[in-house]
Image (cartoon, rainbow, N blue to C red):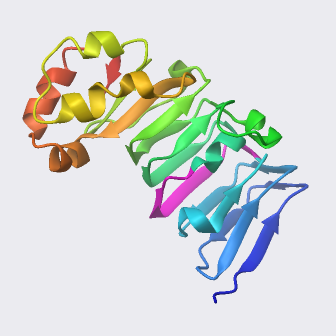
């Protein structure tokens, strides 16, 4: 049985520091009452080793050194003016009130954040104003208001399996979803198409950022 050391940051304000969350034998908690200002947070642990609960981050930089997969804890964080670097897959940000019954999920928010140096794949943004966010460029692309635009997106022919797998399922996204960022090269590998074919369709829509 593997025993992990709990490393807990809570009920404190930290400014202008560099936090290295990289020990594989530790379970990191960024928890209630924690406020980080202008800090650099280095993440090199899997999602199972990182718990974020009711923490606030202002003007911080997150350097993701190991791909962070399916990390929903961001929806219990308040993020303002932060920058993300590295690979994030299946992560959710913002205010997702229906995510869980625990009250800390009502704490989630995101504004004025910059993802232009990140690679996002299947990441969703909830309950926020996407106009305040900077999304990564191609080969990433971001659908603004994916649920509201789902009918329009379904009205055209998508290459390969992109239509049935990615576009036709937009209706099933949580109601709070205001933006969805995908990674074109990952889609090409999975869904039997090419980068050129996919981009040719994406370029037809002015509500897709790429």
Q: Quadrant of residue 98?
A: top right
Give the percent coordinates (x, y) of residue 59.
67, 42
Give the percent coordinates (x, y) of residue 95.
66, 30
Q: Mainly helix, strand or loop, the magenta region?
A: strand
Measured along the vertical axis of the image, is residue 158 above or below residue 106?
Answer: above
Question: Outermost residue toward the right?
Answer: 11
Measured along the vertical axis of the image, is residue 97 above or below residue 93?
Answer: above
Q: Residue at x 29, y 25 (%)?
A: 168
Query: Is residue 77 in view?
Result: no
Q: Residue at x 79, y 46 (%)?
A: 54
Measured along the vertical axis of the image, is residue 142 above or below residue 6?
Answer: above
Give the percent coordinates (x, y) of residue 157.
12, 19
The total of numbered circles placed on residues is 0
Judge left or right: residue 48 versus residue 122: right
Q: Which quadrant is home to the C terminus?
A: top left
Q: Quadrant of residue 24?
A: bottom right
Query: Is residue 96 in view?
Result: yes
In magenta, the rendered stretch is 56-71
Judge left or right: residue 41 versus residue 125: right
Q: Which quadrant is home to the N terminus?
A: bottom right
Q: Residue at x 69, y 54 (%)?
A: 39
Judge left or right: residue 180 versus residue 27: left
Q: Quadrant of residue 94?
A: top right
Judge left or right: residue 10 versus residue 97: right
């Amino acid at each position: 049985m593997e025993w992990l050391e709990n490393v807990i940051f809570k009920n404190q304000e930290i400014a202008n520091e560099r936090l290295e969350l990289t020990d594989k034998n530790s379970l990191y908690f960024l928890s209630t009452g924690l406020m980080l200002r202008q800090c650099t947070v280095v993440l090199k642990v899997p999602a199972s080793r990182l718990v974020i609960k009711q923490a606030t981050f202002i003007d911080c930089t997150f350097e993701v050194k190991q791909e962070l997969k399916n990390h929903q804890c961001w929806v219990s964080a308040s993020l303002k003016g932060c920058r993300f670097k590295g690979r994030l897959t299946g992560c959710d940000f913002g205010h997702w009130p229906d995510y869980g019954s625990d009250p800390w999920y009502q704490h989630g928010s995101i504004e004025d954040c910059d993802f232009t140096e990140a690679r996002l794949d299947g990441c969703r943004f909830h309950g926020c104003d996407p106009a305040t966010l900077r999304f990564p460029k191609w080969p990433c692309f971001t659908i603004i208001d994916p649920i509201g635009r789902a009918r329009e997106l379904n009205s055209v022919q998508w290459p390969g399996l992109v239509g049935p797998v990615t576009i036709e399922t937009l209706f099933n996204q949580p109601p709070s979803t205001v933006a969805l960022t995908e990674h074109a090269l990952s889609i090409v590998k999975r869904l039997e198409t090419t980068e050129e074919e996919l981009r040719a369709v994406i370029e037809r829509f002015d509500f897709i950022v790429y």
